[in-house]
Amino acid sequence: MQEVHDANATRLALAQAQRSMPDVPSTALRALSDSIAAEVPDLSAGEALSRAGTQLREALDRRTAARDQKILGARGDAARASEAAAVRTATTR
């Protein structure tokens, strides 16, 4: 019974990790740019916008890397669970 529970939990974790990430709101770039401009008033509007774009890209890269790592972990868990179930099945026959 524990095997079934573990397999279901692994499938759920993998499904959650593989969900598509939500889009960045269309207003995020402008809001971040305005925030940067307020913090660093010496920047031009273009420089603030460039920094905002860079920060959003870096944040998306980090989110993507974290999701990919979660997928790899879930796939590894699934493989280990499958292997363990196969070993238990082979030894009980």
Image (spheres, grey):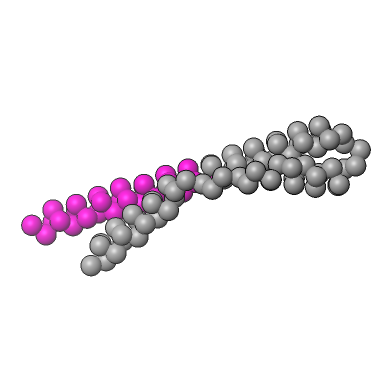
Of all residues, the one furthest to the left in this rendering is 93
Residue 46 placement: quadrant: top right
Q: Tell me the magenta residue range.
A: 66-93
Q: Residue at x 59, y 39 (%)?
A: 61
Q: Quarter of the image holding residue 60?
A: top right
Residue 12 placement (x, y as % from top left): 37, 57
Going by the image, does 12 lie left or right of 65?
A: left
Magenta segment includes 65: no
Question: Magenta span has 86?
Answer: yes
Tally of numbered tags: 0
- The residue lying at 44 percent from left, 48 percent from top is 19
Q: Position of residue 6 (x, y in %)?
A: 31, 61
Q: What residue occupies the far right of the structure in this picture?
A: 42
**Taking 30 as reference, is 82 above or below it?**
below
The x, y position of residue 89, in whole percent, is 15, 56
Residue at 86 percent across and 47 percent down: it is: 39
- Say whether residue 87 is left or right of residue 52: left
Question: Farthest residue toward the bottom?
Answer: 1
* Residue 69 in view: no
Please indicate whether residue 93 sits to the left or right of residue 24 in the image: left
The quadrant in which the C terminus is found is: bottom left
Most frequent secondary structure within the magenta stretch: helix
In depth, the one of 23 and 59 nearer the eye is 23
Q: Which residue is at a point 25% across and 62% down the rendered structure image?
A: 4
Query: Does the rendering let one see residue 86?
Result: yes
Location of the N terminus by quadrant is: bottom left
* Closer to us: 2 or 52: 52
